[in-house]
């Protein structure tokens, strides 16, 4: 992205931050407040990444740092994969059959007994628009305007019954 595009994206992120701050005053539950806080943190982190990218671009133009181009490439790649996670994050290691929730300890998904071996991972279930409340249209607009994915999911331990 060009410097102008980065500046426009930074402006959009700042504007969405103000919208979320204003919307937070209508929160009636702790869950809603937590979602607003996590979205604010994510928007601030994205804006910080954009500031870093713009500083590296300026450094390249000024010729101050011989490694700035490499750092810029890395920061750009990181930003392209950037997403905002509002509630739960689930990491699954299919090689070891383990999972962890929100960066916690790894748990084994394997169980074994006389009937055989079972591998059962939890799954992420997206929050509905009703659960998101007034944040739902804001989240959709953030994703549409900035291209940053906003994940609002919770972990579900739904167990499938055997046939």
Image (spheres, rainbow, N blue to C red):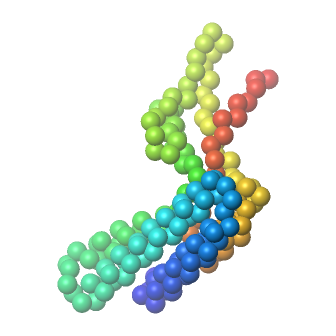
**Would you place residue 104 above or below residue 51 in this image?**
above
**View extreme (top): residue:** 114
**Would you place residue 90 above or below residue 81 in this image?**
above
Q: Would residue 107 be visible to someone looking at this image?
A: yes
**Would you place residue 20 above or below residue 158 in this image?**
below
The residue at the point 28 percent across, 89 percent down is 61
Of the pair 119 and 137, the residue shown nearer to us: 137
The residue at the point 47 percent across, 70 percent down is 44
Drawn side of residue 112 relative to residue 131, left or right = left
Q: Position of residue 122 (x, y in %)?
A: 62, 37
Of the pair 65 and 102, the residue shown nearer to us: 102
Of the pair 116 and 36, the residue shown nearer to us: 36
Give the image quarter of residue 74.
Answer: bottom left
Q: Quadrant of the C terminus?
A: top right
Give the image quarter of residue 48.
Answer: bottom left
Drawn side of residue 159 relative to residue 54, left or right = right
**Would you place residue 93 above or below residue 118 in this image?**
below
Q: Position of residue 70 (x, y in %)?
A: 29, 72
Q: Position of residue 151 (x, y in %)?
A: 60, 58
Drawn side of residue 101 relative to residue 23, left or right = left
């Amino acid at each position: 992205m060009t410097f102008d595009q980065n500046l426009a994206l930074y402006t959009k992120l700042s504007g969405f931050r103000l919208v979320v701050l204003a919307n937070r005053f209508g929160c009636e539950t702790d869950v809603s407040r937590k979602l607003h806080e996590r979205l604010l943190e994510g928007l601030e982190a994205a804006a910080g990444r954009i500031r870093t990218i713009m500083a590296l671009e300026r450094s390249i133009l000024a010729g101050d740092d011989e490694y700035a181009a490499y750092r810029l490439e890395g920061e750009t790649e990181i930003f392209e994969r950037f997403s905002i996670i509002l509630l739960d994050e689930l990491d699954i290691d299919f090689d070891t059959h383990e999972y962890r929730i929100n960066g916690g300890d790894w748990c084994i998904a394997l169980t074994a007994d006389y009937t055989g071996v079972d591998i059962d991972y939890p799954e992420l279930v997206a929050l509905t628009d009703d659960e998101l409340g007034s944040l739902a249209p804001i989240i959709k607009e953030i994703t549409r305007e900035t291209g940053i994915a906003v994940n609002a999911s919770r972990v579900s331990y739904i167990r499938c019954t055997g046939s």
